[in-house]
Image (cartoon, helix red, strand yellow):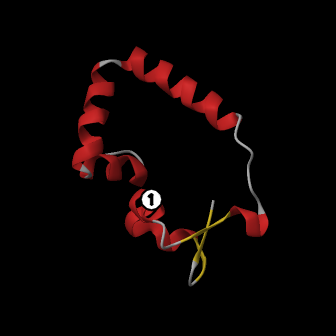
Amino acid sequence: MGLLESDQSLMKDTKTRRLVREMNKHPRRWAEKFAVAMIKLGKLDVLTGDQGEIPLEYEIALHCFGEQKNDFLLGPQKMAL
């Protein structure tokens, strides 16, 4: 069981479960990959307001948020970043 609901979601998905288990075996590798990912995220331009909205029809948004998408809904067709 995951500590956070998002952690638990990673373990429910067959594609991400394998990666989670692999990273659990190699915590130093995970820490290095996490640090690189955080640096990349820090370099992204964050969109706000109307520019920061993602239409729900985008499959990636639905896949990432799954059943939790309702927590992020601003309206019938929009999701906040």
Q: Which residue is located at x 78 percent, y 66 percent?
A: 49
Extreme residue in the front direction? 58
What is the quadrant of residue 80 in the picture?
bottom right
**x and y percent of residue 62 in the render?**
43, 65
Residue at 44%, 59% in the rendered image: 60
- 27 or 3: nearer the viewer: 27
Residue lying farthest to the right in this orientation:
49
Which residue is painted at 48% across and 73% down in the image? Answer: 57
Q: Residues within 10 Å of mark 1 (few under 14, many from 20)?
A: few
Residue 73: x and y in percent read 57, 74
Query: 42 left or right of 63?
Result: right
Task: Check disc 1 and give the amino acid type.
Answer: Ile
Residue 22, horizontal then vertical, whole percent: 27, 26
Q: Is residue 74 above or below residue 6?
A: below
Residue that lies at the very extreme toward the top in this rendered image: 28
In this rendering, is residue 68 above or below 19? below
Q: Quadrant of residue 25?
A: top left
Q: Read off the residue under disc 1.
A: 60
